[in-house]
């Protein structure tokens, strides 16, 4: 066998060994790593959030609306409940725009330093009663918004926001209870 032929065989053998090593490394990367004995597997825990939006008139509860959602802390960036209507309104002469009227509740829960942090955004809107409307022909839209954060104690109801209606003796209170599923 000539020297050039020996070199060619040697190069082919080396190339085959390099390719085999790369395939083995790729196969090892594809196998999921087993957790170490001292690292416990992270278990996902789900919660149900029960919201109660209560309306008070001069200190007396007159109405409560209930909303619920399930979520996993840190798993989903947002969880949302949206109930309402898209109502056409005339912006400029002959131009129709749509506005959302109803209830929108957004929530996110994260696990921070062994405590559960809850962020809530509630946006509620409706049309004013005829006696509350001004003397214009356009309907009056009432809106309340609560943006809050709190540390969650599972199973314990907590008020995350209270809003007074500036035009009446009405007050709105948003309460949430987180229940471990």
Image: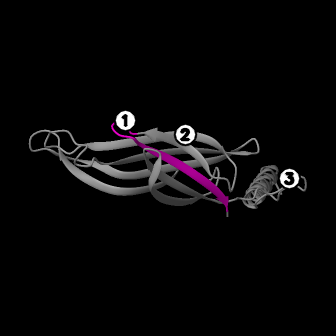
Location of mark 3 (residue): 39
Is there CB contact under 8 Å for labels 2 and 1?
no
Above or below 177: residue 91:
above
Q: What element carries label 3?
A: loop
Q: Does the magenta stretch include residue 69?
A: no
First in sequence, mark 2 or 1: give its number.
Answer: 2
Seen in the image, is 82 located left or right of residue 13? left
Residue 169 is covered by the magenta coloring: yes
Q: Where is residue 14 in the image (x, y as percent from the top left)?
A: 80, 52
Q: Between label 2 and label 1, give the one nearer the viewer.
A: 1
Residue 97 visible at all:
yes
* Front in this rendered view, residue 42 or 168: 168
Task: Report the residue marked by disc 2.
Answer: 148
To which residue does mark 1 refer?
166
Which callout, 2 or 3, points at the residue further toward the start of the chain?
Answer: 3
Look at 14% across and 39% down and name the residue there. 136
Separation of residues labelled 2 and 3 (CA atoms): 34 Å
| Res 77 visible | no
Q: Give the range drawn in magenta.
A: 165-180
- Residue 71 found in image quarter: bottom right
């Amino acid at each position: 066998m000539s020297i050039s032929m020996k070199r060619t065989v040697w190069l082919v053998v080396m190339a085959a060994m390099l390719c085999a090593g790369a395939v083995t490394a790729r196969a090892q990367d594809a196998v999921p790593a087993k957790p170490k004995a001292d690292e416990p597997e992270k278990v996902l825990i789900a919660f149900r959030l029960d919201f109660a939006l209560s309306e008070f008139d001069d200190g007396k509860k007159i109405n409560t609306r209930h909303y619920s959602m399930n979520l996993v802390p840190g798993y989903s960036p947002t969880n949302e409940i949206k109930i309402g209507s898209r109502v056409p309104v005339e912006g400029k002469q002959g131009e129709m725009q749509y506005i959302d009227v109803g209830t929108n509740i957004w929530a996110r829960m994260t696990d921070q330093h062994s405590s559960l942090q809850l962020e809530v955004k509630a946006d509620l809107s409706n049309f004013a009663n005829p006696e509350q409307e001004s003397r214009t022909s356009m309907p009056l839209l009432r809106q309340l918004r609560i943006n809050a954060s709190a540390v969650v104690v599972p199973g314990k109801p907590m008020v995350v926001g209270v809003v007074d209606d500036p035009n009446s003796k009405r007050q709105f209170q948003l309460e949430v209870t987180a229940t471990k599923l």
